[in-house]
Amino acid sequence: MKQSIEELKQLIDRLEKEHVLSKEEFITLIDNPVPELSEYLFEKARGIRREHYGTDVYLRGLIEFTNYCKNDCYYCGIRRSNRNASRYRLTKDQILACCKEGYGLGYRTFVLQGGEDGYYSDEVLTDIIRDIKIRYPDCALTLSVGERSYESYLAFYEAGADRYLLRHETADQVHYGKLHPPALTLDTRKQCLMELKEIGYQVGSGFMVGSPGQTSGHLAEDLLFLHALQPQMVGIGPFIAHHDTPFAAEENGTADLTLFLLGLIRLMLPAVLLPATTALGTIDPAGRDKGILAGANVVMPNLSPREVRNKYLLYDNKICTGDEAAECRHDIDSRIRSLGYQVVVDRGDFKQITGGKKDVSCEINQSRRIYQP
Ligand code: 5AD
């Protein structure tokens, strides 16, 4: 059935009011991301992000500390079977040096992201977490190291980790099986997310847009899954083929659909921390700017040592991997300003609004200033 633009706008109005739609209604919107509707959505998304976070944009310093991975996800360039990947691991000293550089540049969140690498046992990783938190007690520490046991998650939390990113990738069981080998299951992924929440992490999930075999029905399920999970952070980006994977010849996702979904997510989860991701900036040079204008409020520049940046290649043509990466930080700053927003020196915690009053319990009490290069 063909909906009029007015009917589509009414769906968006209802999403803004009620924060959820039925699967069929989400599908209707996702199937019709026409420019007029997108503009209507993005304006609302910007209004809502402004209510919660003003015009502040939060930075996360991404430290890609290992590209070894025991998993073999069909989409990912650092999958175990990719013999052409040049593998590296960072030492604790190297990681601390990244934090030091980042702190000086105004970063107050560090994200330790890596493949599922057994070298970083609970002992090794908790030691790194503890040292970062001792040196930078005013910073938040986010982990993104995949599926681990409840005991590991608890040990990391007790060592000082504040947040955890684990994308669900797709909320459809059958589709999950098309993106991952049988050793990985959606049930385990969901279980991990539940455990992380229960322990007390600020949790992030998310998915790729336009991954092979994905339908608008799958995307609607992804949105409903996120609605049920109520994560504090959501990361989405377009699927981008990597030449050394089984998906080398698959079509990439689009910036337009990713932006549309960012807008929908902002309406569904008004206070969510929502990054304009590197993948979005890779598929479209203006992608991250457009992401901010579609309701995103976080950017995650690369803080990894220069010599390893071009090795953490999850997909082809990833931006900010070479010598120009150092400038990324300043470039991002002036671009954000030109959009009418400003990068702030702040942990950038999730802000919960309860009963019309702002609950600032998870905001750290510290002086906050606008970043000055
Ligand atoms: N294209 C886009 N995103 C990818 N990721 C992994 N491989 C790709 C790819 N080829 C994303 C996954 C993962 C995150 C760290 O990067 O969603 O969770």
Image: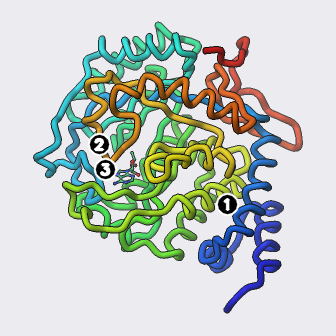
Does the numbered disc 3 mark a residue whose Cβ is under 8 Å from ligand 1?
A: yes
Query: In terms of secondary structure, where does tag 1 sit?
Result: helix
Q: Which residue is mark 3?
A: 316
> Is residue 44 or residue 357 the one in the foreground?
44
Residue 65, horizontal then vertical, whole percent: 31, 28
Residues at circles 3 and 2 in contact by the CB criterion of under 8 Å: yes
Q: Residue 68 sits in which quadrant?
A: top left
Q: Position of residue 15 (x, y in %)?
A: 76, 65
Which residue is drawn at the image coordinates 56% and 36% (left, top)?
A: 299
Quadrant of res 153: top left
Residue at point 35%, 43% (across, down) = 146
Give the residue furthest to the right: 356
Relative image position of residue 173 (x, y in whole percent) = 40, 70
Question: The disc labelled 2 sits on which kind of residue?
Answer: Leu
Residue beneath disc 2: 313
Between residues 224 and 13, which one lies in front from this camera angle? 13
* Residue 216 horizontal side relative to residue 125, left or right: right
Going by the picture, which residue comes out furthest to the bottom? 1
Q: Label 2 neighbourhood size at 10 Å, few (<14), some (14-19), many (20+)?
A: some
Disc with the residue nearer the chain's start (1 vs 3): 1
Residue drawn at point x = 55 percent, y = 23 percent? 330
